[in-house]
Image (spheres, grey):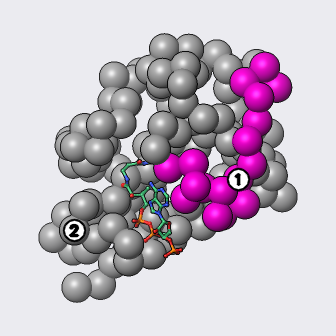
Amino acid sequence: MTLHIRPATEADLPAIQALLSSASLPCADLTSSRIDFLAADNGAGIVGVIGVEPMQPAGLLRSLAVSPDLRGSGLGKQLVAALEAHAALQGITGLTLLTETAAPFFMQLGYAPLARDHVVAAIAATAEFRSLCPASATCLHKYIS
Ligand SMILES: CC(C)(COP(=O)(O)OP(=O)(O)OC[C@H]1O[C@@H](n2cnc3c(N)ncnc32)[C@H](O)[C@@H]1OP(=O)(O)O)[C@@H](O)C(=O)NCCC(=O)NCCS
């Protein structure tokens, strides 16, 4: 089956929520926060997702999850590359993220640790930063243009 990474639609939200929940990622603000999602669609359903909360020139990368049966096949990296291209087109020059388990994955892709008190105010004010991600999560940043 061919995989296609495309902008998600509102109709995709239940599948996105299910994928994020199964990966233990925050879902509480999926409809209240403005998030641009990209979905990896294999024709039968959504098997990967990634999102960005745009706050130009900054962006919060979040909600990266790949279906367990497809992990290790390169889809995670493809989703990050697609999200970076999408964000750059929106005028975003740097992406910040919080992760509890995938810091080594993102550091392979050029993301570097960033002290939380150096995060721009708009990102620090997001629900993910304020309350949804534990204080123990690692904060990473990458300039994308
Ligand atoms: C993190 C995740 C999206 C990676 O997706 P994936 O499709 O397996 O990633 P890829 O196949 O592109 O893997 C690329 C590389 O990252 C490594 N990798 C993947 N997940 C990793 C992790 N959690 N920690 C360290 N390395 C990881 C792979 O071993 C691979 O290494 P290699 O290129 O040296 O062989 C996937 O494991 C996942 O959905 N995890 C649960 C949700 C999560 O933690 N999301 C991130 C929070 S923002």
- Disc 1 within 8 angstroms of ligand 1 (CB): no
Residue at the image position 15 percent from the left and 70 percent from the top: 44
Marks 1 and 2, the one that precedes in the sequence: 2
In the rendered image, which quarter contains the N terminus? bottom left
* Image position, residue 123 (x, y; %): 68, 26
For label 1, the crowd category at 10 Å Cα-Cα, with few meaning under 14, some 14 to 19 and many 20 or more, is: many
Question: Above or below — where is 68 with respect to 128?
Answer: below
Residue at the image position 29 percent from the left and 84 percent from the top: 2
Give residue 98's quadrant in the image: top right
| Amino acid of disc 2 | Asp
Residue 21 in view in this figure:
yes
Q: Which residues are magenta?
A: 102-118
In the rendered image, which quarter contains the C terminus? bottom right
Question: Above or below — where is 96 with respect to 40?
Answer: above
Q: Is residue 26 left or right of residue 108?
A: left
| Amino acid of disc 1 | Tyr
For label 2, the crowd category at 10 Å Cα-Cα, with few meaning under 14, some 14 to 19 and many 20 or more, is: few
Give residue 84's quadrant in the image: bottom right
- Find residue 69 and name its label: 2
Q: Which residue is mark 1?
A: 111
Q: How many tags in the picture?
A: 2
Question: Above or below — where is 122 with respect to 102?
Answer: above
- Find residue 73 and name its label: none
Residue at the image position 44 percent from the left and 50 percent from the top: 64
Q: Is residue 75 covered in magenta?
A: no
Secondary structure under the numbered disc 2 in the rendered image = helix
* Image position, residue 48 (x, y; %): 34, 60
